[in-house]
Amino acid sequence: MKVSNDLSNALRAFRLKNALRAGRRNFGALALLLLLAAVPVAAQDQASANRQQNPPASPASAAPPVAAADSTYVIGPDDVLDVSVWKEPDVSRTVPVRPDGKISLPLVNDVQAAGKTPSELAEMLTTLFKKFLNNPQVTVVVTQINSRRVYVVGEVARAGAFPLLPNMTVLQALASAGGFTPFANTKKIHIVRTVNGHETQFPFDYHQVLKGTKSEENIQLLPGDEIVVP
């Protein structure tokens, strides 16, 4: 009987020990779950506090975009314009300037754009849209400048049309064309300029200009000028 009682007591002690071990494991797992659950709650509380301190701006109170500063650039045919009317996406457009100098827009139809600066065109469009829209705010941005070009033709490496950069001279345009071919007559270069239907030619002696003896021939180019290299 004593052996039986001892065996029974040992079995109860073994079961009690296992139960205590299982309890410790369950307690650790429970504590870990509680810790993980507390992390997102704390993050939500912090985000809520941040929103209270820095509330997002309401779309209704957002300020309209600032119009581009006045520019002296004059819009020309083939330029591409971005015409944006604040809060009016249905009438905002990216439009090319046609060869006749006009653009086409909803509500106002054909509008003369060539010969005006972006700010002048925006002011005119604002006046036109007032007939159809409540307090329109118009911004005009030139996204592509295609009207200001010069042309280099003849005995050069890359003949063609080139963008007219600010204060561009004949030498700079020739450099854009990649220089001369072996057959170029650099003493007989000339610039052809047409103004109001009247053609004028300006001589350009390449080597004398480089020497500085005829630096006045290195004139500043205008849109549409043609540099002829015979």
Image: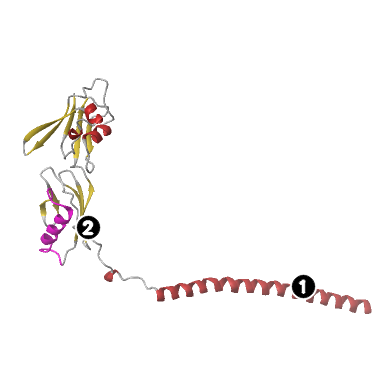
The answer to whether residue 43 shows anywhere in this view is: yes
- The image shows residue 55, relative to residue 72, as above or below, that is below
Between 92 and 198, the one nearer to me in the picture: 198
- Depth order, front residue of 116/230: 230
Which residue type carries mark 2? Answer: Ala
Task: Write down the residue under mark 2.
Answer: 69
Q: Can you name the residue that lies furthest to the left here?
A: 197
Asked whether 45 falls inside the magenta stretch, the response is no
Mark 1 residue element: helix
Task: Point out the image quarter for the N terminus.
Answer: bottom right
In whole angstroms, how far apart are the C-alphas of marks 1 and 2?
A: 81 Å
Q: Position of residue 51 (x, y in %)?
A: 41, 73
Mark 2 is surrounded, within 10 Å at the Cα level, by few (under 14), some (14 to 19) or many (20 or more) other residues, namely few
Report x, y in % for residue 47. Answer: 45, 72
Disc number lying in front (1 or 2): 2
Few, some or many residues within 10 Å of mark 1 (<14, 14–19, 20+): few
**In the image as oriented, which residue stretches furthest toward the right?**
2
State whether residue 1 appears in this view: no
Give residue 191's position: percent from left, percent from top: 15, 31
Residue 123 versus residue 227 in the image, above or below: below
Q: Disc 1 marks which amino acid?
A: Asn
State the colouring used for the structure image: secondary structure
Please tell me which residue lies in front, 87 or 175.
175
* Left or right of residue 95, residue 195 in this image: left
From which residue to which does the magenta span run? Answer: 113-134
- Quarter of the image with the C terminus is top left
Q: Tell me whether circle 1 and circle 2 mark residues in contact (CB < 8 Å).
A: no
Label of residue 18 in the image: 1
Q: What residue appears at the point 31 percent right and 71 percent down from the top-left corner?
A: 58
Figure check: 122 above or below 101: below
Q: Position of residue 43 (x, y in %)?
A: 50, 71
| Nearer the observer, 83 or 10 | 83
